[in-house]
Every structure is written in C-alpha cells, then in structure tokens.
Image (tube, grey):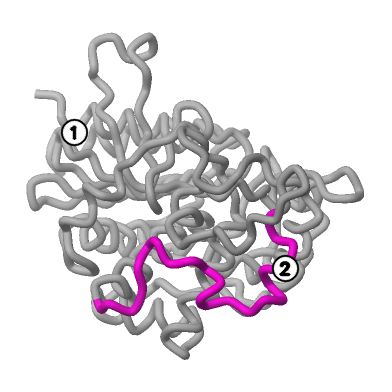
C-alpha cells in the first residue's frame, strides 16, 4: 500500500465515530488509477441504498432516448402521460399549468412542483419525517402524484432563476421512460446501464424482504425502511456499491451512455439548497469563496441522496468519486469525507 493510499484509508477510519458514522465506503478514479476503501461496518463490496443518486440513472436514460430521437427535452409531458396523472398536478394561483410542464422542467427542478416526500402532507408531517420516526411504509406512483397534487406548487413552470428540488419531478420521468420504451424502468436500467457497464451489484430495489443492502442509520440507530425504498423507483430506488458507482459516474461523464457534448448543455445552474445548485438532471456542489478562500475545494458535478450516498466528478482535477457514510441524518458528512479524500489525493 502506497503512502497516499494509507492517508486515504486513514480519512475513512477517522470518520468512524459510532455515533453518527458507523461505516464508510468510497471509490476514486483519477488519471486512470482507481482506489477503493471502506471502514467500520461497511466493506468494499457491500451494496447500499444510493437513494436520490438514482436520479443520475434516470437522467442518463432520458438522454439516451434523446440521442435516439425518441424524445426532446422540450417535449410537454402530456405527450407521454395520461390525463388522469396530469389533471390538477400544477395549479398555481388559480391557473392550471399542468399541460405546460416539459421533460426539461422535471429534470432541472424548474417545474415548481412541491416535493411529495420532504414537504408536509395533510397530517402535518412529511413522509421523510414519518420514516425517521420508524414508520416504514410503501406508496404507489399514483399515491405520490396525488400527494403532490394536494400540495401547492411554488411557481409557474420555467420561471427564470427559480428551482425547487422535488422528488415529484422524477416519478413522472420514470413513467415517461416506460411509455416510450414499453419496458419497466428496472429493465431500462438493466438494458441501458447495468448490463453494458458490467455493474454486477447494482439493481432497482423492489422486494422489501431483500436484506442485501446495508440497513441505513438515522443518528445512532438503525433505520429499516425497506418498504419505503421499494417505492422510490426512478427518483431513488437503486442499490449499488462504490465500485459499481465509480464505473457508472465515469461512463456518465465520458460519453459511454449518451453523447458527451450533452454535458455542457446540462450545466444551467439554479440555487436549490446551500451550497447546491441544480442543473438539468445533475447537481453542482460548489463552496462559496467565504468558505473556500484558497479554492482548495474544487467544484463537483453529479448527485447525492438521502442515504448520504454520492457520485461526483471534478472537472478541475479529472477526478471521479463515489461513496456513502450510510447516515440519513447529518447531510454534510458525506461531503466532508469527499472533500478530505480529494484533498489528500491531489496534494503534491
């Protein structure tokens, strides 16, 4: 083991405190060289829930269908979805904008739709809040849409400089993929991404009795929410490993899944939550100058999820990094680990 590899492993070992982080698993590729590391109760080959990092799979499939000429990002979603799904989906200040929604609006979180998962429902709690208290439950696509309809949209679709992160955007994208291909979302993942890239431990989680993925933690306690994890589908249902995700994120940004020239088109950034910005199907993680005065932390583009899984690419350093700290609380912990690993690797 080289001195640099020892330093990388030390970052993972030191992250384990058995209060917030019980396991870490990360993979890095830089200049053609790959490093895999794990610590605590995670091993290098242990599958875990990647949660909303799944959205990169959905984005990749949409862009593949664009390459084939099967869709345009400017297509109205009513071209592909039944009126029953759309009716009343986006009513803002008394005006119905449901038929104005485009694939681009959904990918970029510029639809204005509320988040069926993270925002409060009629009982005053969000689905996320309920899950965190141990109330595991499943829901259907139709129930996610109905819950979204019961929430007020935040703005007219495509309002300039406006974005709002919402899982409700990616549920319909899964249905659009199925409508175009006449195949389930899971089969599209298998046929277009998982099998071609040889992702041997990656799949869409659909059976709540499947104990293969590592159980999530919420603070110091395990959080078994397998029923919920079967419900996310195209907005957060993939299980994978850091090694598989490294192959995927490399393929995503190098033209193996769709034309690489699309990547520049996706980078139209709008603020969603600090310090994240949403592009079209991807996110930008970029610390502002006040927190990064020397510029030591480069910008990263990719995605992350509720499970604290992440998959990012640093164009500045030609570096790909994937991993998790498997902790639903404390959203900063995976990013702090990613930053420390990156700094150790690029330090001369």
Question: Residue 15, how many percent across, how many down?
Answer: 45, 33
**Residue topped by disc 2:** 87
User: How far apart are the alpha carbons under marks 2 and 1?
Assistant: 51 Å
**Can residue 79 be found in the magenta stretch?**
yes
Q: Quadrant of the C terminus?
A: top left
Q: Nearer the viewer, residue 335 or 102?
A: 102
User: Residue 5's image quarter?
Assistant: top left
**Can residue 76 be found in the magenta stretch?**
yes
Q: Describe the element under mark 2 as helix, strand or loop.
A: loop
Residue sitting at x 18%, y 64%: 259
Question: Residue 20, how many percent across, how many down?
Answer: 59, 35
Residue sitting at x 30%, y 49%: 266
Question: Residue 155, how many percent across, how many down?
Answer: 63, 40
Mark 2 residue crowding within 10 angstroms, few (<14) / some (14–19) / many (20+)? some
Q: Is residue 3 left or right of residue 104?
A: left
Q: Describe the element under mark 1 as helix, strand or loop.
A: helix
**Residue topped by disc 1:** 345
Which label was assigned to residue 30?
Answer: none
Residue sitting at x 37%, y 37%: 269
Magenta part of the chain: 68-90
Q: Residue furthest bottom?
A: 182
Vertically, is 311 above or below 193?
A: above
């Amino acid at each position: 083991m080289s001195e640099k590899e020892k330093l990388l492993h030390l970052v993972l070992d030191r992250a384990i405190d058995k209060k917030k982080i019980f396991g870490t698993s990360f993979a890095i590729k830089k200049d053609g060289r790959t490093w895999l590391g794990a610590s605590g109760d995670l091993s290098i080959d242990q599958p875990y829930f990647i949660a909303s990092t799944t959205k990169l799979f959905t984005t990749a499939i949409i862009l593949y269908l664009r390459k084939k000429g099967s869709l345009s990002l400017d297509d109205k979603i009513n071209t592909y979805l039944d009126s029953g799904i759309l009716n009343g989906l986006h009513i803002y200040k008394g005006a119905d904008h449901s038929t104005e929604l485009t694939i681009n609006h959904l990918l970029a979180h510029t639809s204005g739709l509320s988040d069926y998962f993270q925002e409060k429902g009629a009982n005053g709690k969000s689905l996320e809040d309920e899950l965190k208290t141990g109330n595991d439950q499943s829901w259907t696509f139709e129930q996610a849409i109905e819950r979204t309809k019961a929430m007020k949209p935040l703005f007219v679709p495509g309002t300039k400089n406006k974005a709002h992160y919402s899982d409700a955007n990616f549920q319909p994208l899964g249905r659009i993929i199925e409508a175009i291909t006449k195949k389930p979302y899971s089969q599209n993942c298998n046929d277009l991404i998982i099998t071609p890239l040889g992702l041997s431990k990656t799949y869409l989680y659909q059976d709540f009795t499947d104990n293969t993925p590592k159980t999530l933690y919420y603070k110091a306690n395990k959080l078994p929410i397998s029923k919920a994890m079967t419900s996310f589908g195209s907005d957060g249902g993939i299980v994978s490993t850091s090694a598989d995700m490294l192959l995927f994120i490399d393929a995503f940004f190098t033209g193996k899944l769709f034309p690489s020239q699309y990547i520049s088109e996706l980078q139209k950034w709008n603020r969603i939550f600090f310090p994240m910005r949403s592009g079209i199907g991807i996110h930008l993680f970029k610390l502002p100058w006040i927190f990064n005065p020397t510029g030591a932390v480069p910008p990263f583009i990719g995605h992350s999820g509720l499970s604290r899984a992440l998959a990012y690419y640093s164009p500045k350093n030609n570096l790909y990094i994937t991993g998790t700290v498997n902790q639903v609380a404390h959203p900063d912990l995976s990013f702090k680990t990613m930053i420390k690993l990156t700094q150790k690797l690029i330090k001369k």
